[in-house]
Amino acid sequence: MGFDVFISYPHEDKATADAACAKLEAAGTRCWIAPRDVTPSADWAASIIEAIDGCRVVVLIFSSRTNKSKQVHREVQRAFEKEKPVVPFRIENMLPEKTLAYYMGSVHWLDALTPPLEQHLQALSETVNGLLRPPQIAGEQVPLKREVKAELQGAEARRLRNEAEVKSPATEQERRQIIGPTRQLSRLAAVIGSLVGVTVLIAMGVLLVAARQNAVIETSVPSSTTVERSTSTPESLGAPVTAAPIPTPIPAPVALTPSNSDIPPAVKKVSSERFHSDTSTYDRVLAKIKRS
């Protein structure tokens, strides 16, 4: 079973420690006190260490006997090492000494020096409960008990479920009104996308056919291309045209015909003989042709 408060005391002050334990537990605070809560056959020191480590507040019953108890010194030391808040409940007008003075010098004391003890125990219970209760933020609601909170949560869940069942038809109708146009728009978008895709395919097919026809026409007339290339002029090729040089007219040769008076007699004789020989040769050839 869990607990909230560890009560440290010298064994001489056990009666006061039991009274403080009873008062705290009457207020709903769970306490651990030795030897009541030490498990039989368990190690005493180990039980003390576990109890201090597991508690939230340590109540120290302080008197002149406390200064002399080494067990109490070790318990206080362990509490401060684990950063547990310590509430000193002083039942004698004494100050801490040595080890306790080191740890308890700056701690506020809760005095129970004057009778009756019951009123001081009431103050101790209120102080401890204040330490155990988490700090409340301004405007924050007081925490409800676990059972009440669970019941309220169950009631709220049932209310929300009933409201959902009542509003479900209207909600379904509204949902259809919203989803219907959305579906129509999605279908229209799908149809438009299909048409665009078909149009693009047709256009690509037309372009491909036209490209093939142009390629066939170009390959079917290579001669015209050759002729055009052979008959191309410099003007068509874009080359610079230079004027052809005008040929200089050559004067006609002047026939120098010598007169008969200028020809020597010997030359005239030779020329006459060659002319007659040539004429006779021509006549012989012509006669031979006729006979054949």
Image (cartoon, rainbow, N blue to C red):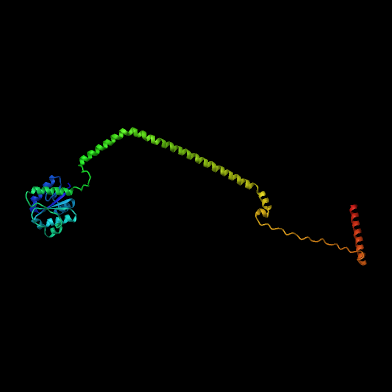
Q: Which of the 4 quarters of the picture holds residue 79?
A: bottom left
Residue toward you, 145 or 9: 145
Residue appearing at x 43%, y 37% in the figure: 185
- The count of marks equals 0
Q: Position of residue 208 (x, y in %)?
A: 56, 44
Q: Nearer the viewer, residue 15 or 112?
A: 112
- Residue drawn 13% across the image and 59% down it: 101
- In percent of width and height, residue 135 lies at 20, 48
Which residue extends farthest left? 115
User: Is 92 or 289 nearer to us in this picture?
Assistant: 92
| Residue 48 placement (x, y as % from top left) | 15, 53
In-front residue for pair 114/194: 114
Q: At x 90% / y 52%, what residue is drawn?
A: 290
Q: Is residue 166 above or below residue 229?
A: above
Image position of 9 (left or right of 198): left
Q: Residue at x 33, y 34 (%)?
A: 168
Q: Position of residue 126 (x, y in %)?
A: 14, 47
